[in-house]
Image: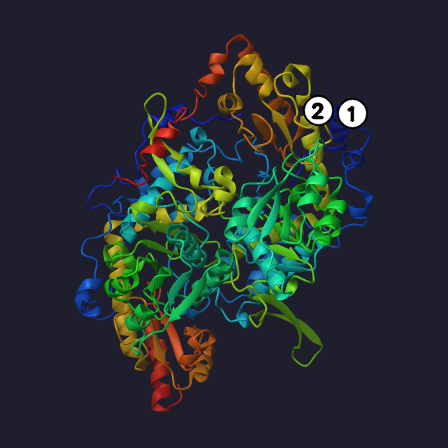
């Protein structure tokens, strides 16, 4: 597999350090109006006294600079990227082409709906497809990312309860939850109450029962959870939560396991967020953009953010009717807007193209293959040569991901999960998510996704085996890895102690 | 097999054998029957790539985009020219397809981009620390409200009516969760924030005061005076700014802003019907450990080589969980990359030249239209005018392929006949004169 050029790290030069006075890439359009001095347009205090210190670089050197930087990144198009809970599936190239069409990419967000019918129809169709996939009837595409969808979900929960005159101040999250869940709870003005995990890796039902009191607003749950396990007690969980008058929130980070197989709405969830950058192929972009649409049940619908896309049958040319689409701002019980405009439309285009390409059967096959790949890799890594060092945390059939514990490697070889991850970099594969979920010691969380062929999975097994074998001979090698990357282990503690966050 | 998977029937069988189960169905045995979907998803069948392309193309063709009309529409997102190098560099797999740089040794490109981005935002805003981007503009305003809560423990957020309506609404929506409330200070007769009205709202319980530069009507606000009024009782002064005009405007950080946030679409990002773009978040040094989002920092590796890492992560949700300073995880790395390429392309001089060109054309346009100005004070790329028969103008303009701007009545009922006109470098004198011919003919009562 391709590796990064180790020499790429020898010269680290920022764009500012490439600046030479007088160089430029931009040529301004000619001034075609009277040349009124800026002093007559802007009063003294408002005019910038000295220019911002941006670099002065020619176009060829800008291109080389950023191309050079790109070569210091490992990416999904280059190699295996089994980052648990991140769903690093292939990003189809068609999506970039259609998203770049000027009718999508150059459409102003405040264009009159009459002149944006294609965009609104696309959003309407995407909403309908997402609703069907989640088994919940109403969708808002507005939230910007999964964490924003979570916040929307709790604000909706609050609006719902307050309209009923109920003042609840706690939200339950399992101890396996993504960090965004408890962080969201605090931002939404609630207190976090943790629920334990039982010996099968699911929610501890008795703990839940004791904590599901009438001051609880919501249980936020990921199913399958971050251990990659489907909670067999989901129907009982829903009964307990609803019995307490709370809402049940579905963190859709792991939706890739169950599309077309089991729907959150049918499990009893009231509110769901989707990560379009996980299950629905929006490229991750090195950390965004994403989108975090939400779907809700009937009782939550009145509170959805505004505007909502609406569809009307309109008489056209006097001959029959064809639908027209609009934006409805008149939603008096809405929680309001979460952000500007209608959401990350460019992401919607890509995810809609994906759903059109696959259809219902293709989505189901996607999830089936994701689960097949994960279980195959789980089974391969269960061989004694690996499992003695990296035992599986919960030895069950998994869904789209699974979690190993590095405690064996730590105790028997004296190397940490971090060392194994860093040594993987020298083998040209991206490591799994490490040290999460928190309840597994030295965790490695592995999500291969459906788009990896069997031979890539086999290669990963070889990499793991060889790292462990090497450590049996000489653990120092892993402890100081990586060796072949543009830089080696970085001083993170020093960076945090004396932060240098801009060019001096 | 579906379009993007690789497993053949033979693969599948071999893999099931290795797992030790008989069928795919066995892998889903953990899912109770009661929550299994007992039918296919009710979605249209999958289609070949070319048909999906044709379908998405036909939807695109039903939108009127910014190359198909002469548009003066702005109001938060603007039709600026996006240079070709941005498409080229953003299309590279190495930028498009990685995850957040959790493994810095193989993510130096993305991390250095963040560092360079932070530097550029610091320069533009005049504030020493910037994060590596947040979702977009209005939610960045809301994020500043949360920092003000963490910092002051107070409950009131005072906003100028000159703040973008979406920012005011997003802030109010989020404030419900923060257990805070918002109060609004109006605009004066000249379309600038009424500094006395604002001062009257600021009290000991005020956590932060929010204004926008230029404001929603395009007015260049007197930030110094507003900042003084805002900070009397210890509230934070938050300025939401459009970063592009900051090339010629005094940086908010030099006029008392504690925090400067904003919408980054104008820096090399597409219109995209409203997103994705990026938001930025810059602040005074003393807030660095309370900022939201990713921050890249410079450091050294074990061999002493220069490198970059995500730093101060103990603020963040994946480490601090319920004690995090914000819940944000995914931000807008690719859009921020477009921003830093764009600023490099403009360069130190180009940013000023572009700002001056826009200001001069805007100055010209306001005169040429010959209409009563709602905000007669200084403007640099957008302005508001009263149009006696606004709907008639829109109709006439539309018939000529001109989108004359944003009708203020949609969000400012007090400006029933108000039109907000945006001038970018893509709107030359000829375009402005065409719109002016319509307003002139209407004013003089002759048919256009």
Q: Which quadrant of the figure has residue B168?
A: bottom left
Decide if residue A4 is in sight here.
yes
Quick check: A241 above or below B179? above
Q: Which residue does the image show at 17% across and 66% down from the upper left? A: A39
Quick check: B158 above or below A384? below
Q: Which residue does the image show at 58% across and 22% down from the upper left? A: A406
Q: Which residue does the image show at 51% across and 63% down from the upper left? A: A337
Left or right for B104, reference A39: right
- Residue A476 is tagged as none
- How far is mark 1 from mark 2, CA to CA? 8 Å
Chain letter for the residue marked with disc 1 in the picture: B
Question: Quick one: quadrant of the N terminus of chain B?
Answer: top right
Chain letter for the residue marked with disc 2 in the picture: A
Give the x, y percent position of residue B219. 30, 69
* Tally of numbered discs: 2
Closer to the camera, A238 or B404? A238
Left or right for A271, reference B140: right
Q: Which residue does the image show at 80% across and 34% down from the upper left? A: B26
Give the x, y percent position of residue B33. 82, 44
Closer to the camera, B174 or A75? B174
Q: Residues within 10 Å of mark 1 (few under 14, many from 20)?
A: few
Q: Are marks 1 and 2 in contact (CB under 8 Å)?
A: yes
Decide if residue A285 is in sight here.
no
Q: Residues within 10 Å of mark 2 (few under 14, many from 20)?
A: some
* Residue at the disc numbered 2: A379
Q: Secondary structure at mark 2?
A: helix
* Residue at the disc numbered 1: B20
């Amino acid at each position: 597999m391709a590796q990064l050029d180790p020499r790429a790290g020898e010269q680290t030069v920022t764009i500012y350090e490439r600046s030479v006075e007088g160089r430029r890439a931009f040529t301004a359009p000619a001034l075609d109006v009277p040349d009124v001095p800026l002093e007559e347009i802007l009063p003294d205090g408002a005019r910038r006294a000295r220019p911002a210190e941006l670099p002065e670089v020619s176009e060829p050197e800008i291109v080389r600079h950023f191309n050079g930087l790109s070569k210091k990144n490992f990416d999904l198009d280059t190699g295996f990227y089994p980052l648990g809970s991140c769903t690093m599936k292939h990003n189809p190239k068609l999506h970039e082409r259609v998203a770049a069409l000027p009718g999508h990419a150059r459409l102003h967000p405040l264009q009159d709906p009459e002149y944006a019918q294609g965009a609104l129809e696309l959003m309407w169709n995407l909403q309908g497809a997402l609703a069907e996939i989640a088994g919940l009837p109403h969708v808002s595409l507005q939230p910007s990312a999964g964490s924003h969808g979570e916040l929307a979900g709790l604000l909706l929960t609050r609006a719902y309860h307050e309209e009923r005159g109920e003042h609840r101040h706690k939200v339950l999250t399992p101890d396996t939850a993504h960090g965004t869940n408890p962080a969201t709870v605090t931002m939404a003005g609630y207190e976090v109450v943790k629920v334990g995990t039982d010996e099968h890796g699911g929610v501890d039902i008795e703990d839940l029962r004791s904590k599901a009191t009438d001051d609880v607003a919501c249980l936020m749950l990921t199913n399958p959870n971050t251990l990659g396990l489907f909670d067999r007690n989901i129907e009982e969980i829903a009964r307990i939560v609803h019995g307490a008058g709370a809402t049940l929130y579905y963190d859709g980070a792991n939706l890739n396991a169950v599309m077309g197989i089991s729907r959150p709405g049918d499990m009893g969830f009231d509110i769901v967020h989707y990560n379009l950058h996980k299950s629905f192929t929006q490229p991750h972009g090195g950390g965004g953009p994403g989108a975090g649409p939400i779907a809700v049940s009937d009782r939550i619908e009145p509170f959805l953010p505004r505007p909502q896309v609406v569809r009307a049958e309109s008489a056209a040319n006097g001959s029959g009717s064809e639908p027209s689409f609009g934006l409805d701002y008149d939603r008096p019980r809405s929680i309001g807007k979460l952000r500007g405009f209608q959401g990350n439309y460019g992401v919607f285009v890509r995810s809609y193209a994906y759903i059109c390409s696959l259809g219902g059967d293709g989505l189901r096959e996607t999830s089936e293959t994701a689960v097949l790949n994960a279980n195959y890799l789980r089974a391969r890594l269960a061989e004694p040569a690996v499992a003695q060092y990296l035992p599986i945390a919960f030895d069950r059939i998994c869904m789209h991901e699974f979690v190993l514990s590095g405690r064996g490697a730590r105790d028997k070889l004296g190397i940490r999960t971090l060392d194994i991850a860093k040594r993987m970099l020298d083998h040209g594969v991206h490591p799994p998510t490490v040290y999460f979920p928190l309840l597994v010691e030295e965790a490695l969380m592995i999500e291969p996704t459906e788009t990896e062929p069997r031979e890539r999975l086999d290669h990963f097994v070889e990499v793991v085996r060889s790292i462990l074998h090497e450590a049996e001979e000489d653990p120092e090698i892993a402890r100081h890895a990586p060796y072949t990357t543009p830089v080696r282990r970085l001083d993170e503690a020093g960076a945090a102690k004396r932060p240098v966050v801009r060019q001096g | 097999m579906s379009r993007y998977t690789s497993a053949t029937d033979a693969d599948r069988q071999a893999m099931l054998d290795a797992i030790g189960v008989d069928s795919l169905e066995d892998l889903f045995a953990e899912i109770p029957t009661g929550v299994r979907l007992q039918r296919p998803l009710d979605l249209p069948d999958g289609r070949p790539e070319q048909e999906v392309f044709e379908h998405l193309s036909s939807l695109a063709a039903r939108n009127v985009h910014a190359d198909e009309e002469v548009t003066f529409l702005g109001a938060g997102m603007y039709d600026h020219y996006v240079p070709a190098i941005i498409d080229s560099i953003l299309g590279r797999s190495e930028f498009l397809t990685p995850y957040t740089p959790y493994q810095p040794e193989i993510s130096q490109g993305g991390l250095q981009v963040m560092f360079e981005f932070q530097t550029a935002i610091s320069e533009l805003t005049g504030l020493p620390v910037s994060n590596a981007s947040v979702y977009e503009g209005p939610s960045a305003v809301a994020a500043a409200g949360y920092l003000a809560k963490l910092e002051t423990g107070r409950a009131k957020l005072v906003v100028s009516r000159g703040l973008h309506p979406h920012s005011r609404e997003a802030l109010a929506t989020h404030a419900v969760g923060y257990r805070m409330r918002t109060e609004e200070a109006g605009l004066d007769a000249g379309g600038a924030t009424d500094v006395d009205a604002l001062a009257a709202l600021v009290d000991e319980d005020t956590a932060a005061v929010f204004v926008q530069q230029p404001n929603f009507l395009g007015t260049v606000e007197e930030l110094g005076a507003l900042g003084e009024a805002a900070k009397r009782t210890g509230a934070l002064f938050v300025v939401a700014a459009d970063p592009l005009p900051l090339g010629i405007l005094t940086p908010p950080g030099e006029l008392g802003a504690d925090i400067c946030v904003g919408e980054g679409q104008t820096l090399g990002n597409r219109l995209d019907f409203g997103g994705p773009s990026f938001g930025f978040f810059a602040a005074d040094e003393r807030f660095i450990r309370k900022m939201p989002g990713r921050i890249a920092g410079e450091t050294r590796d074990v061999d002493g080589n220069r490198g970059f890492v995500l730093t101060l992560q103990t603020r963040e949700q994946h480490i601090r969980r319920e004690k995090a300073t914000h819940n944000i995880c995914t931000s807008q790395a690719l859009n921020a990359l477009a921003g830093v390429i764009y600023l490099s392309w403009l360069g130190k001089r180009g940013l000023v030249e572009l700002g001056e060109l826009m200001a001069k054309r805007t100055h010209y346009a306001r005169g040429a239209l010959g209409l009563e100005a709602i905000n007669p004070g200084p403007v640099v790329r957008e302005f508001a005018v009263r149009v006696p028969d606004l709907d008639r103008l829109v109709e006439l303009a539309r018939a000529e392929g001109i989108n004359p701007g944003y009708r203020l009545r949609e969000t400012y009922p007090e400006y029933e006949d108000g039109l907000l006109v945006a001038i970018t470098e893509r709107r030359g004198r000829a375009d402005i004169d065409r719109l002016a011919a319509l307003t002139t003919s209407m004013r003089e009562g002759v048919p256009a």
